[in-house]
Amino acid sequence: MNRYQKDSRIQELTDQLQRGQLSRRNFLKIAGGFIGAAAASSALAACGQPATATTPAGEGGADRVRLGMMTTLSGIGSIHAPPTINAANLALDEINAAGGLLGKQVDLLIEDNHTDVDIAVQKGLKLVQEKKVAAFIDFGFSNSRFAVAEKVALANKTVMLSPIFYEGGICNRYFFNISALPNQGINPFMPWLMKEKAAKSFYGIGSAYAWGIGSIDAVEKAAAANGVKFLGREEAPFGMTDWSAIIQRLEAAAPDVCFVFVAGNDLVTFLKQFFDFGLNGKVQLAFTYFQEEVTPTIAPEFRAGHLSTNTWFLSYDSLESKKFLEGYYRVAGQGTLVTMFGEGTYDAIWMWAKAVEKAGTFETEKVVDALEGLAFKGPQGEVTIDPKTHHATVRCLIAESTEDSNNFKILADLGMIPPDPPQACDANSVR
Amino acid sequence: MLNFVLTSVLNGVSLAAVLILISLGLAIIFGLRGVINLAHGEFFMLGAYTVWVTENAGLPPFWAGFVLAPLVTALAGWIIERSFIQFLYRRPIETLLGTWGVSIVLRELVRIVIGPEHHYATQPITGQFELLGFSYPLYRIAIILFTAAVVALMVYLFAHTDFGLRVKATISDRGMAEAVGINTSRVDQMVFVLGAGLAGLAGAVMSPVVAINPNMGLDYFARTFLVVIIGGIGSMLGVLGGGSLIGMLEAGLSAFLKPIVAQVIVLVMAILVIRLRPQGIFGKAK
Amino acid sequence: MSRTSPNIEPEVARRASPARAGRVGRQWRTVLAHLLPLALLCLFPLISSEYQVNLLAKFLVYAMLALSLDLLWGYAGILSFAHAVFFGLGAYSLALVMQYWGELPGATYLGILLAVALPSLLALFIGYAMFFRRVGGVYFAIVTFAVGAIFQSVTIVWIEFTGGLNGLYGFPNPKLGIPGVWEAELVGGPLTYYLIVAVLFLSLLFARQLVNSSFGRALRAIRTNEERVEFLGYNVPAIKLVIFVISCALAGLSGALYVPVGFVSAEIMGILFSTAAIVWVAVGGRGTLYGAILGALVVNYLQAFMSDVLVFYWFLIIGVFFILVVLILPDGVIGIAQRLYRQMRRG
């Protein structure tokens, strides 16, 4: 058959539709098509409808309950996802082995948010509205977190736990943050740098979005509060391939310490060029995100000497940490990469479990009340949720990178620091 | 002050060199057949990954990959051209869509097979060039020199070889070229392969300087197209001109403006050029 | 199969026979062909969950965007990579009006007005600058590409105003109705769904009228051979400008409808979203109006379904799907229907 004929057939159908001159033949085709579509969609609707439509929220059946989890399996955040999944599986293994929650075994429902806002909200709504999860873990970037907190957690009154650090600003009754805010990283970090590294001037380079800009703001504020100089800032759009101009200005400013809040692949590009311009050693780099998955991307001769504050490092030595690693390697395989994102996910899931036990029910409002003020001894230490802001008290560790990507030398342990969001937050005023 | 100016100029030249190196392949393909290959950036990406893969496999760091990369991408280009592109030459919109599909497939295959983690490739030339207090990364200077060599090679290829003659004849008048016995189908293949190979070479060269990840081709996406269109189709001068203009302008503006402002200005300027001189700066008027 | 073969004759005969192929009969069938899917859409909320209804509502908004792009690209042959910008402008217009003036009566209507006006003005500006200087085809596409990149960058960085990548949220919901007499909030759910169905249907009818008119014929002529149309004495730049503005205004309106069912952030302004719209139209079959709607629904449902079932591989499959569409289905989904019918007829 040739294209010409094909064209004319299609043209015939749509022409007729448009002109209002539909022949019976074509009408039957269309009608058939739509009946088929209707049949298909009702079939889909029927089996898509959860059998648990009439059972209370979260309950997957008589003896099972569902915990949802969204993570960045694909998209630009994909590199961070594996530890979160492994840690989640570990937590669930442990919970189920101990008899489950309130007698029910817990199922983990994982969805990929593709590091994309639209998909994150869509998947979140699917977890909450269709799969009727009792609560969900949201591991995503700052771009989607606000949307999910607003459109999924708040709109549907479902508990949302976020185990990844961010710049602050989300405040609602159903959102819980189990990770560091700027005040739990940058604020204690700066006086330490001033004391231990004789730092008198600071600089900020970050990606041009909420986390990057918000974090640089926090550095600027901290510098002012500590009476040291803040020499300048750079906000780079995503996908920046040539950092030469920014590095040139950095070199000219010659700060003692430069904070780097560049996200994703751009961080690697920036570092490669930073080293290429010979600035390593001339400017001390400081981070609130620099961990075991980043160092392997750097040339060995430049890996050591960068400072970062995290809530947890692989090299952190505590009883709970050892136990966590044992379990983690059992679940994921010896030597598998584990980061503070994994540790945070582990803590978040366990805290939800503890809250459910304390509340004696899966019902959201009671679990929220139980989460407020809850304390849990995780690998990093005893994490507590502040009842007013729904953010957590977390540990502040300062470590230096070494040539071995898994071994960050811990230089200081500043203990557990309470959260102080940049904007005043009374989580229960927003329902 | 002199340091600042010199550094800025070199920044501009090195950025221009990178853009020219990446856009050469695209320009050649576009000039010949009007084919917009949206997967061009992915050939670039494959070249960079080749360097990492060869190093990871134990071969001599960088140089083995550097030699292999254009060969690998040329082969990939040939496969794609034979299996797919050759049916779409007369349909530019379908080519656009199809190559976008190829772009997605290549990116995802790399992500699935190799993984999304960042990777590290050894930089062959490290250190800075230092003279009287002025210092500039040696590798960037090497990139500039290398690009100049590649451009010279291309000029020679198109001006002084049989192959170049055949390509020019085909661009000029396809029917006539076929009438005098030129196998234009082979010319199409060779040109596409050449374009893909050049992109792979660019990827290998850039692998120490940027993050190696499946989406790295997308970062150069917009600018390579602007370079080709602004410069003008159909001439080496076009790519040189376009690349230099965009590279130097972006670097120059970035020297004292916020990077995002610089990028927006470059885009606005590009639109103006297209508006005022649709054939590009060095293109032949219609 | 030759065009004059006997197999074709019966159709010609049928068409010629007055009893079977009465004009009234054909019109009646057309109306029914339109009402049938409309009825199905109206019944949908009664048989599905809230989640599915909101999902379909969002996809119908996408379908409207695809429809507007089909008018521009499918009929006039003007490819634009910036269509998302007009969609985004529409969405931001309504969202920002609600954020700053949401308490005022009739704010929603102001927002919707801006959602249509602003994209139209931008389209007017760009169209005038480009079409009257004969910038067309690939060059125009690249210009739209640059425009899209500019708007996305600015939106991401101008956080105070647009919320950047975090987007806009927490603003009062748009309200439908007469202020003071009766008002209903648009915040997802059946009301929003029916509104979207209604607007989409009306847009489709409008588009039909447009392409059936002599203006529509001029568009198709321009797509086929622009030079010839110019030689025939038509003011081609003016015609292109008109369709560009209409198309972008429709895109802006669909953007406004997106506000209650989607999330307003810099992502909807981007090149990737524009490219997605092009794919929807191409998959469905461009230049057919119905194809654009079908394509938007098919691709989005496929994506939603794929990412459930094959979490790790779904994007790869989408890519392969695009390639297949181009190679095997240049006329999109509507082409499949034709082929199946031909197969059935043969066998």
Image (cartoon, coloured by chain):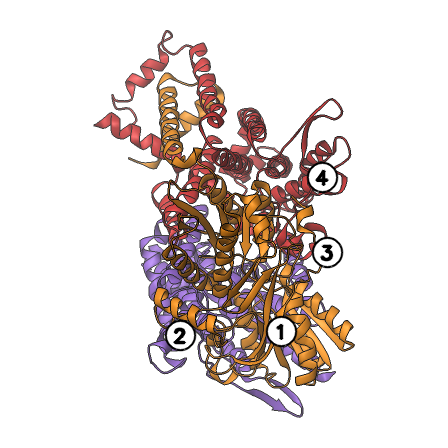
Q: CA distance from mark 4 to mark 2?
A: 52 Å
Q: Residue furthest top?
A: C19
Mark 4 — residue?
A: C98
Q: Residues within 10 Å of mark 1 (few under 14, many from 20)?
A: many
Relative to residue A370, is residue B187 drawn left or right?
Answer: left
Chain identity for the colour orange used in the image: A
Chain of residue at mark 2: B
- Please tell me whether mark 4 or mark 3 is closer to you in this view: 3
Chain identity for the colour purple used in the image: B
Q: Residues within 10 Å of mark 4 (few under 14, many from 20)?
A: many
Q: CA distance from mark 4 to mark 3?
A: 24 Å
Mark 3 — residue?
A: A424
- Please tell me whether mark 4 or mark 1 is closer to you in this view: 4
- Say what amino acid the circle numbered 3 marks: Ala
Q: Residue at (69%, 52%) from the top-left corner?
A: A426
Q: Residues within 10 Å of mark 2 (few under 14, many from 20)?
A: many
**Residue B89 showing in the rendered view:** no
- Is circle 1 on the same chain as circle 3? no
